[in-house]
Amino acid sequence: MALLAGCSSSPTVPTQIDAPTPSLASDKRLPAAEIQSFYSPILWAKLRGEPFKGFVVAEGDVQGSRFVARRILESYPDGSRNGLALGFLTNVALNVSTVGTNLQPKAMAYVVFYEGNFDGDMALIYAKQVGYSAPGVSGVARFFAARRY
């Protein structure tokens, strides 16, 4: 290995490209349009761009009218909020349509965490029935709540 006299190089430090701040408006992994339906236009204008700290997406079944999480599909930025999200999801109630079937209805649930944005920490919890349609049944069961934690 040869040593070059008079040459010096400084180690290059990768520059971090500013990623967009995650919000309901910018993160396409979340059902923002569906959540928007629960808000007035004025409140939605404030919430949609508000940065969140993380989210958890879970899939599960509906037993009776209760959502039962079966697995976590995604945790952003990491799994540190999974336990808290699962706790919130035990209170999700969905009045699902089961016309003509004995199969347990399936559902998806989303918990979005905000820390310090609204005079404290808050979670938005949204769940919906998925994978079911029947003749004469309009819409699917949905649940929405905001909880302080």
Image: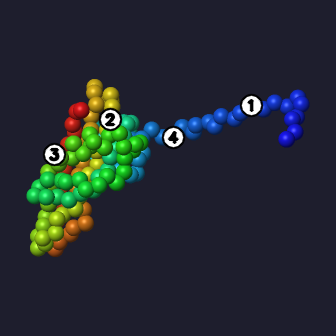
Q: Quadrant of residue 101?
A: bottom left
For the C terminus, the quadrant is top left
Q: Of marks 2 and 3, which one's residue comes earlier in the chain?
A: 3
Label 4 vs label 3: CA separation?
Answer: 34 Å
Distance Cα–Cα, label 4 vs label 2: 18 Å
Label at residue 122: none
Q: Quadrant of the N terminus?
A: top right
Mark number for residue 114?
2
- Residue 144 seen in this snapshot: no
Q: Which residue is mark 4?
A: 19
Q: Amino acid at mark 2?
A: Tyr
Q: Position of residue 94 (x, y in %)?
A: 15, 54
Mark 1 falls on what kind of element? loop
Which quadrant of the figure has residue 135?
A: bottom left
Q: Nearer the viewer, mark 4 or mark 3?
A: 3
Outermost residue toward the front in this view: 1
Q: Callout 1, which amino acid?
A: Ser
Numbered label attached to residue 91: 3
Q: Is residue 92 left or right of residue 57?
A: left
> 80 or 42, which lies in front?
80
Q: Position of residue 143 (x, y in %)?
A: 19, 50
Q: Residue furthest top?
A: 119
